[in-house]
Image: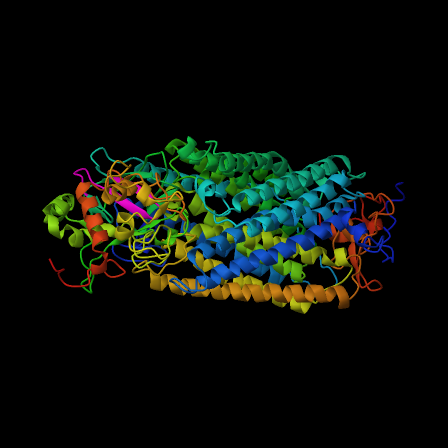
Amino acid sequence: MTTLDATRPLDTRPSADNYLTHSRGVLSWILTLDHKRIGVMYLVSVLASFLLGGVFALLVRTKLLFPGEVSWMSAEAYNHFFTLHGAVMVFLVIIPSIPAALGNFVLPIMLGAKDVAFPRLNLASYWLWLLGATCVVLSLLMGSFDTGWTFYTPYSTTTRFGGVVPVVTGAFILGFSSIFTGMNFIVTVHKLRPPGMTWFRMPLFLWALYSTALIQILATPVLAITLSLLAVERIFHIGIFDPAWGGDPVLFQHFFWFYSHPAVYIMIVPGMGIISEIISVHAHRHIFGYRFIAFSSIAIAFFSFLVWGHHMYTSGQSGLMNVVFSAITFSVAIPSAIKVFNWLATLYKGSISLTTPMLYALAFLFLFTIGGLTGLYLGTLNTDIHLHDTYFVVAHFHYVMMGSALIAMIGGMHHWWPKMTGRMYSEFWGRIGCTLVFIGFNLTFFTQFMLGSQGMPRRYYSYDQLPGMAEAFKTYHHISTGGSYIMALGFVITAIYLIHSLYRGKPAPANPWGGRSLEWQCPSPPPHDNFKVTPRVGDCYDFSVVRWDEASNGYIVDRSLDPELNPNAPKRKGHH
Amino acid sequence: MHALLNSLATAAPASGHTSFWLPRSGSTTAPNVDFMFMAITYVCYFFFVLVVVLMVAFVVRYRQKGTKLEFHEGASEHNTPLEVTWTVIPVIIVVAIFFGGFKGYLTLATPPANAYQIDVVAKQWSWTFKYPNGAISDDLVVPAGRPVKLVMRSDDVLHSLYIPDFRVKKDVVPARYNVLWFQSDTPTGKRADGTDDFHNLFCTEYCGKDHSRMNRKVIVKGEADFAMWEKDQAEWLIKIPKDELYFKAGPILYARCSSCHTLDGTPSTGPSWGPYNGLPAIWERTEKGLTKVNGKPLSELIGPGKEFEHAKGYIANSILQPNKHIVDGFAPGMPTFQGQLDDLGIDALVGFMQHLNEFDSKGKLKAAQPAK
């Protein structure tokens, strides 16, 4: 490829030959090396898993409408359902959702590259994901498991249900899928940036994916080791974690959280990257404090490795360790706070379109603020002692994992949907879906803060035996379950209008939102090779060169106005 | 500042009352935890309102009409003093919160030297509390006005002892002794409706099927009351005449077995003591050697010159070394009661089994007084 005149507009005309039509047949998909197709396959698989995990959640919530025993769900069945909900949502949905599904699709295009650095590794990662998911399904057939998604020993090494070994094998394999994606992204970002794309020109979503990839390749092997040891102990009774065979159960918790706390950031950091994109694109405003946001992603990635012990304040680890972990934990609060203030400042003096992706981004700001602030209670030593393993923790991590990471993922999906499918969805139904999800989410999870601070432990099948508390708990649980139904309705509506858009949606212009980064300067859907010529890159957040184009019914990036690309361009207005 | 601290103190629940956020406060360390809780809550209110108000205001003020982008003067790309400010202020706040929690935690983590020690054994799915004088209790009864130290261990998987009203919690781990302490100054006494008041005690570390049923009462007694209770509790078995043991002590002791062994043949974690699978009730099937253990009938284990001389020996052994012989169809998993049941206790339980027909399915005596 050659670099042509940088000011010439990139070719954004829709073409009959795009990545969806480039080749045909089932084999052309399952053996594809195209990052876009792999991203789409990941997206479909992740959404299917989300449906499954969601059904488990609704079963759990429905049981909790009734304080006591119910004939249609035994305590053991309940334990299986909350365990499956957690394991499916964490390992099959949230961890791969943004990097592997959206990141795969968007990263090379945003960067201006033809594909990721190792396309075959990318395909292998998807196949490993499928294999891992198969193991999870297999575990359901082999007696399932009731250990909680944390697999705490010695319960997990002694439970009579036979699904533990298959599911940890699945998580082990899924870990490698995640490592492959991470490795690919790191090399791609280092080696495949086109001319002009310096580190500090990269869209912030790429910084976020890069930070995430660092965590993925450094932390995930620890999970693999831990789960292997768990399986070895369960099969061969070699004492590692179970004191009955000479092991130490608290060691398992150290190992597990050494991965799983960084994993929390594997889930949320890419979500933060999406929010940086959505807010600046839909507010048509240069992102505020680019370097602070970029560095805060790296800072979070770094600190995430040093705070695992805050999951173990009550485990009996030494008091000194508790104090050290508490102190370091608070340092993670700072980069998160910085990001929130920067996003707010990006709204200031913007030109804000209240599109569906923007509504999701605003919902994220609202929910992440609650999720982040309630983390303060849990980092603080003496309040965490009261709140640990209660519903307060459940509420907190749902605000962060679902209210933030998943809402960002759904916002990102709406943001890039026209690019991925070449179709527009109904804005009207999009806003209704987002509103229902937002209201339902808050009803479901805000009530759980009160449940927890009042003392209701998590993972409880029944609560009728808690004298003096059962009545108040019942009211909160009813509101919470009602909220979960509203949320489910919102997601059903979302699924319907998105699927509808595939068949009946208006054709999408190349740049429906007024975006400035490179993916908005190639056709929707993108051609097989993304760009016909290697693009030169200007400032991805300079929206002064973006204008509405009646002919294409979308925005265009007028490259001749960009002083970075054209020295004769008129001086920009409104920016400095 | 002083006014703020006062308002924090009043927002937290006074002892005996539940607030919107927190249950009643029942220990000497709880007010400190509540203070930190409410202090953080006000920090949260402030930042939440700040973020949401600015967000809504900006969206309303700078909403784009139509498709034309509007550019406003002074929309800067960065502002270092501003960014440093909103980095430094949160740093100061979290450092303050950290120290508040740290100070409170030092107290929580350090049991006073004169604390009254109670040993705790947790197992699936029950708690046992052992007192210095040998008394054993299913509920946690503690003296008022005195620090109490719980030395805890688990017989099987992880558990966690949590008393919300006291704001204390600690995991109970096998092969480790974890310590937790508290002091409650107010005896629990009676409720308005005349029933005994108490604090809840929960298991908060997921431990399997009956995790949510693993809860107990915490009863705080005044000094004299407590001393009396402790003495009675240690001697209650001795005081019961031998021939009344099975119906006076049996049902009380059976309560510890009831989460796994039913009396009416209903399947559960362990073999029912009632008739099941065509076998008669426990005493009859053991005496006749009908139960199958490790694939063989018990008659091969019980009898003159065999492992057990008498059926009672087999039952006592099953209580003290439960995993030595496993009844067919069941998995090993019963905890040992070694050190918790002495000979009198075992006599009472075996007597209870021998007279099972005098009790209902919950272990309650059917008649007011059994025929002698």
Q: Is residue B54 above or below residue A191?
A: below
Question: For residue B120: magenta?
Answer: yes
Residue beneath the point at 37% across and 33% down? A319
Residue A355's x, y, as percent? 67, 62
| Front in this rendered view, residue B194 or A214 | B194
Q: Is residue A64 above or below residue A328?
A: below
Q: Mark yes or no: residue B106 visible.
A: yes
| Front in this rendered view, residue A161 or B185 | A161
> In the shown orientation, is residue B188 left or right of residue A402?
left
Q: Is residue A554 above or below residue A330?
A: below
Residue beneath the point at 42% across and 52% down? A458
| Front in this rendered view, residue A234 or A543 | A234
Q: Quadrant of residue B223?
A: top left
What colour scheme has been applied to the protein in the rendered image?
Answer: rainbow
Residue A48's x, y, as percent? 64, 56
Question: For residue B163: magenta?
Answer: no
| Front in this rendered view, residue A11 or B298 | B298
> In the shown orientation, is residue B73 left or right of residue B9?
right
> In the shown orientation, is residue B274 left or right of residue A554?
left
Residue A374's x, y, as percent? 46, 50
**Which residues are drawn in magenta?**
B119-135
Q: Mark yes or no: residue A572 visible.
A: no
Q: Is residue A200 above or below residue B251?
A: above
Residue B178's x, y, as percent? 33, 36
Q: How many marks?
A: 0
Q: Quadrant where the N terminus of chain A lies?
A: top right
